[in-house]
Amino acid sequence: MRQGSTPPEQLFPPEFEELWNSPLARRFVHAARRLRASAVGHPLALDVVLTLLTLAAGLSSVAAPSEARGGHNSAAASTALLVLTVLGQALPLVWRRRAPLPVLLVVLLASTVQWWVNAPQRSVVAVLIVIYSVARYERLRLLAWSVPALALALLVPAFRVDPFREHALYSLFFLYATAVAASALGLVVRVRQAQLNALADRAARLEVEREQRVQLATLAERSRVSREMHDIIGHNLAVMIGLADGAAFAASNDPARGAEVLPVIASTGRQALSELRRTLGALNQTPDGAAAADLELTPQPGLSDLNTLLEGIGAAGPQISLRTSGDLASLAPGVQLALYRIVQEALTNSLKHAGPATTVQVALRAAEGQVDVRVRDTGRPDAAPAVPVAEHDGQGLVGIHERAALAGGTASAGPTGDGGWLVHAVVPLSAPHTREEEQP
């Protein structure tokens, strides 16, 4: 800091700080904020007040003694002419927001008449107001039309009005600078308001987009849970129904054989309940992301669980064979889950529609960057025709198509021509990331 300079804390005298922090100053600031809020909410009322103030200032100059009007040209301006010019300056201000350019032309015309007769110079306030209004509210492509009219009108006071014409060029420069300052203020406020409107629109758009993302995420989660619930309930109920039918048939011939099936039915039911608890538990997590303490979490099934799946369905009666080739164990968990669900749904459909006496062949082959899955059954043993596509294509086949599509692949299903049914799916080895991979 240079010697003799005032410290920052002493820029204002203590009396100013006391005045600024006084209750009177605080009430003044509060009143100013309320006035501004009222002006924003009622712009027409503000324009009416501005018009009345400008009109009162102009009429006070008309009512002044003739000596106060000054100059040798004051006798040429009659009182009626002055009243008309004052009205022409003040009354158009009511429409300064709706028609800025016409209001500017009217006010400039009335002010030019006053300046020409060298009347009391009260009109400069109205001119500055309309200059600001044109820059603030007029359409941008019309702003240029106000420049010639304003430049010509300001020549009159520079060369006709007593205080200005003594130094006409300096006065003209001052008048032009004042007009530029008023227009610059209007443009600054206009740009600032445009920025605020843009920020408000962006905030509203981001809020709408955020709500849409939440809704899409909710719908996606509901679809995922619905798909999982269908796979779990549909598969396990089909197995349990097949086992129950087999047990009822066996009990009529061999009660001991029928009793052996009952533990398998109970085990299948417990497995279904466990998977349901795991799936629904993912929806009932605590705010920090932890699941309920009493929920036993297990990993999502993969290709290593196919043998358990085949044994469970085979217990209901179908003869199932599995053939695999390629490196299936190194597949991503999401791909393995998709393949497991596709095989599970295909076997469930075979058990439902072909019956427990059918033979099912399951083949998985990983080669050339993709996994080829085929689940083929032989149909009913009585060689009845395969179920038509319109009758067979229920929620299960839709789920197979969705599973394959989410993994980046394709799926198809249809009769084989010899009474059987074939489900064929092709899934790439590097499938896109799915939400199932994130589940425990």
Image (cartoon, rainbow, N blue to C red):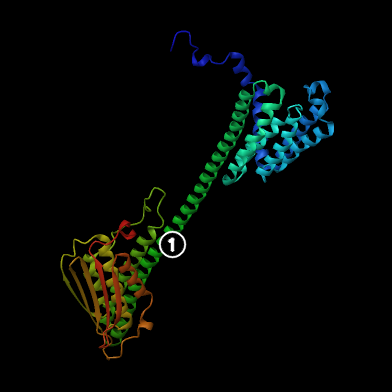
Looking at the picture, how far across and down is residue 395, in whole percent? 38, 74
In which quadrant will I find the C terminus? bottom left
Question: Is residue 182 visible in this depiction of the protein?
Answer: yes
Height in image: 312 above or below 281?
below
Q: As rendered, which of 196 and 234 lies closer to the eye?
A: 196
Instruction: Give the side of residue 79 with respect to residue 341, left or right.
Output: right
Judging by the rendered image, the residue that carries numbered circle 1 is 219
The amino acid marked with disc number 1 is Leu
Image quarter for residue 25?
top right
Who's the residue at 80% across and 36% down the image? 84
Local SS, label 1:
helix
Who's the residue at 54% across and 43% down the image? 194
Looking at the picture, how far across and down is residue 140, in whole percent? 57, 45
Image quarter for residue 49?
top right
In which quadrant will I find the N terminus? top left
Instruction: Give the side of residue 149 with respect to residue 356, left or right.
Output: right
Looking at the picture, how far across and down is residue 309, in whole percent? 25, 71
Q: As rendered, which of 21 and 363 lies closer to the eye?
A: 21
Height in image: 426 above or below 110?
below
Q: As rendered, which of 67 and 20 lies closer to the eye?
A: 67
Looking at the picture, how far across and down is residue 95, in whole percent? 70, 43
Instruction: Give the side of residue 192 with respect to residue 337, left or right.
Output: right
- Give the number of callouts: 1
Who's the residue at 31% across and 71% down the image? 268
Question: Is residue 45 visible in this depiction of the protein?
Answer: no
